[in-house]
Amino acid sequence: MPQPFHPADELLPPATFIKRLLAMIYDGLICIAVLIVTTWIYTMLAAWIIGFEQYKALAASGKLSPDPLLTSVLFVVLFVFFGYFWTKSGQTLGMQVWRIRIENPDGTPIRWYQALLRYLIGWVSWLTGGLGYVWMIWDSEKRSWTDRISESQVVRVPKAP
């Protein structure tokens, strides 16, 4: 059984919409860096496999874009990035800065299946113009679509004594 972040009887308040949004912006900048590095590694591997001269010729002729394999790799890399942080500490780097955390209602870290649900529904939430996140403003429990579907919650982490 995973170690809880806090006692089960300790109820932490839900994270505010603004803190969640700020953490998303911070994490978005980190994601851009992760995607750039991943794309560079992918490009170097592809050029090495095909041959650097032939790869240059393909790039010059415009036959390399769009690349569905690269898109799939980037999608998976982002999931692994978020899934790792969410399942280990409940916090990405942006969430640590704004002192918020994803956890189960009993205070334990979420599982990989829940992380996958959060990740996929997160894309749906953004593709609907952010409605899945704005939803928490009207929700009685202050939960977004990702919280509801994954049966988890985003809470405020108290300051260390």
Image (cartoon, rainbow, N blue to C red):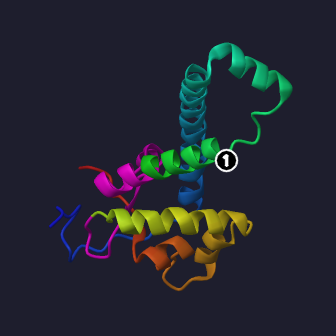
Name above or below for residue 133 compared with residue 94: below
Looking at the image, which residue is at 53% across and 35% down? 34
- Residue 49 at x, y percent in the picture: 56, 24
Which residue is denoted by mark 1 in the rendering? 68
Name above or below for residue 34 compared with residue 8: above
- Magenta stretch: give its range: 82-108
Front residue of this view, candidates 67 and 125? 67
Position of residue 4 in the picture relative to residue 94 (left or right): left
Front residue of this view, candidates 10 and 84? 84
- Residue 98 at x, y percent in the picture: 47, 50
What is the residue that sits farthest to the right in this orientation? 61
Asked which quadrant contains residue 102, the reply is bottom left
Q: Quadrant of the N terminus?
A: bottom left
Q: Residues within 10 Å of mark 1 (few under 14, many from 20)?
A: few
Looking at the image, which residue is at 59% across and 49% down? 72
Q: In the rendered structure, which amino acid carries the disc numbered 1?
A: Pro
What is the residue that sits farthest to the bottom in this orientation? 140
Looking at the image, which residue is at 45% across and 64% down? 116
* Magenta-drawn stretch contains 91: yes
Name above or below for residue 113 compared with residue 86: below
Q: SS for tag 1?
A: helix
Position of residue 90 in the picture relative to residue 73 (left or right): left
* Magenta-drawn stretch contains 65: no
